Amino acid sequence: MDRRHFLMSTAAAAPLAASALASPNDTIRVAVVGCRGQGNSHIRQYLPMKNVEIAALCDVDDSILNQRLAFIEKESGKKPAAYKDLRKLLEDQSIDAISIATPNHQHTLQTIWSLQAGKHVYCEKPCSHNIFESRQIVAATRKYNKLVQHGTNSRSTAALKEAVQKLADGYLGEVYMSRGLCFKWRDTIGRTPPSPVPDGVDYDLWLGPAPKREFTKNRFHYNWHWFWDYGNGDFGNQGIHEVDICRWGLGATLPTKVSAMGGHFMFDDDQETPNVLTCTYEFNVQGKKKFMVFDVRHWITNNEATIGSPQTNTVGNIFYGSKGIMSIDGYAQYETFLGRKFEPGDKRKEGGSLWQNFIDALRSGRREDLAAEIEEGAYSSTLMHLANISYRLGRTLNVDPVTGDVKDDKEAMKMFTRQYRKGFEVPVKV
């Protein structure tokens, strides 16, 4: 592990090279990698944009790939090029940007491959499957001097940008604590035995860096989130948005202490990751202690602070200050309640497009125009990884807030990385 400062700061990086686009009106050619769930959202975001062309699609599943190709051709009159292997796609020098929506265990390696091929990247959250990858994705971004956006959508919304600015300006007084809520109805996934790989699926490419295992339906589409080989539980799925907002609003980066407890309750099924998890963090922000709590709950529970309801998902954030609280419901609205009587204060509901922000930044060629630059994503992903390590080891982690290392805990440090399958190694030197 590189024991220098955990991440290279944006200020220390070389100035971004001028945009490779010939003029602001030139068409930006984008390739979408991973086309099923969130990848379909990427397609629908880029498709109506002016002077943006979805030039290629890449997916290991022919059935998904063919569905998306047909949809784009119907909507635009153009049929993108089709690939199963990203490495073949990256040989096309006419493509400007790669938009990655594959499973978590693929994100860092595919981003690094894309950067090495001279492409800008939109990378879905979380940007890494482990802490080593959080470090490497930032290092590669700086080395190849490209734009990389992290898919935490709230960073682009007008409401949340205003909310975070109000916190920084002291609207709630001294903000001492943030709370992230990920209460989502998640039914049991049951058990699925090994079965033949579906026709048209390249399972070896899908596994990528992960160890070779027999194919089962539960380890494939979507349910891969609940297995440590590929996902990071609901913290790394939905919860990464909320922990990013928690950290953003506190003005924090790396913690001094992390503790997480939970378990896999109620269901007897194939899931490995916890479906109930409570994580606590301590930070030192400009000499003051700040506290953060993050919760996953999977079934019947309450709502909190005007967020959600007991009958629906409760997903959002609460900030606690000396003058009141702020409630954030989802990605694009906030409310404030002031004083001991909780008098209604400022509020706003207004969204934004992180994909449009990415395209706009490609046109400007300015890293600072990215709403969710990869360094921010790497910090938030690392907070998630630290809590999962604490949960899996069953103990509190004392963290060096400069290096990001866990102090005096070789077992925890060993969990910063993984054994990579041959041919799919995340490089130690990018």
Image (spheres, rainbow, N blue to C red):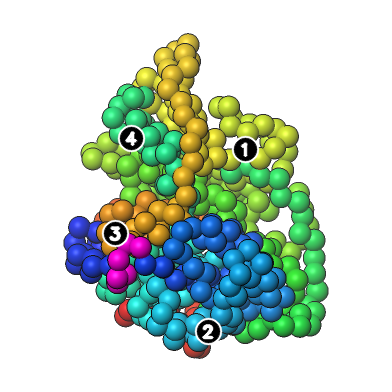
Mark 1 and mark 3: Cα distance apart in space? 37 Å
Could you say where residue 416 lies in the image, as x and y percent from the top left?
A: 43, 67
Mark 4 and mark 2: Cα distance apart in space? 44 Å
Depicted 127 relative to depicted 154: above or below:
below
Residue 4 drawn in magenta = no
Along the line of sight, the residue nearer the viewer: 311 or 59? 59
Dot 2 lies on which element? Answer: loop
The label on residue 314 is: 1
Labels 1, 3: front one: 3
How many marks the image carries: the answer is 4
Mark 3 and mark 2: Cα distance apart in space? 38 Å
- Sequence-wise, which precedes: disc 4 or disc 1? 4
Labels 2, 1: front one: 1
The magenta stretch is: 20-25
Which residue is denoted by mark 3 in the rendering? Answer: 364
Quarter holding residue 167: top left
User: Which amino acid type is marked by label 4?
Assistant: Gln
| Cβ–Cβ under 8 Å for marks 2 and 1 | no
Labels 4, 2: front one: 4
